[in-house]
Amino acid sequence: MLQPSKPKFRKQHKGRIHGKAQSGSKLNFGSYGLKARTPGRINARQIEAARRAITREMQREGRVWIRIFPDVPVSKKPAEVRMGKGKGSVEFWISRIHPGRILFEVDGVSEDIAKNALLLGAAKLPIKSFFIKRMDV
């Protein structure tokens, strides 16, 4: 699973997701992509599940680019622990997603295979997204 190798700080504040994506909102690598429609948080397990679904549907042909990286730690306290005593330990890593962000890109397969694969991958994610293609294809 994806996670940073050496984060500068162990724990972070939760933060908020405001506005639309500035960077990462255009296709850079592939001909087809999956674009976020709503804001949200995607964890490393969900990214990996979507990647597996996409590559399996494409039957390992073509190429897949993951355009998001889970670099925000999320901490949790164990169940039935009293209030206080500090912040919990890091449980998993998430990526904050703004609307308009490209999540995955695909190339080297036909449009219908790419669309099926990306929509299967989108079903594994907790946010709404849609299929896009490069205009010069």
Image (cartoon, rainbow, N blue to C red):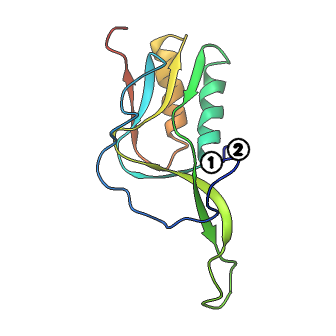
From the viewer's perspective, tell me whether residue 34 is left or right of residue 63.
Answer: left
Q: Note whether 25 is above or below 90 in the view shown.
A: above
Q: Residues within 10 Å of mark 1 (few under 14, many from 20)?
A: some
Viewer-proximal residue among 77 and 58: 77
Q: Note whether 49 is above or below 136 in the view shown.
A: below
Quadrant of res 61: top right
Mark drawn on residue 98: none
Residue at left offset 47%, top offset 16%: 112
Amino acid residing under circle 1: Ala
Q: Position of residue 28 (x, y in %)?
A: 43, 21
Q: Note whether 36 is above or below 55 in the view shown.
A: below
Circle 2 residue: 1
Viewer-proximal residue among 78 and 21: 21
Quadrant of res 131: top left
Give the CA distance from mark 2 to mark 1.
6 Å
Quadrant of res 1: top right
Mark drawn on residue 44: 1
Amino acid residing under circle 2: Met
Which quarter shows the C terminus? Answer: top left
Specify which label sits upstream in the sequence, 2 or 1.
2
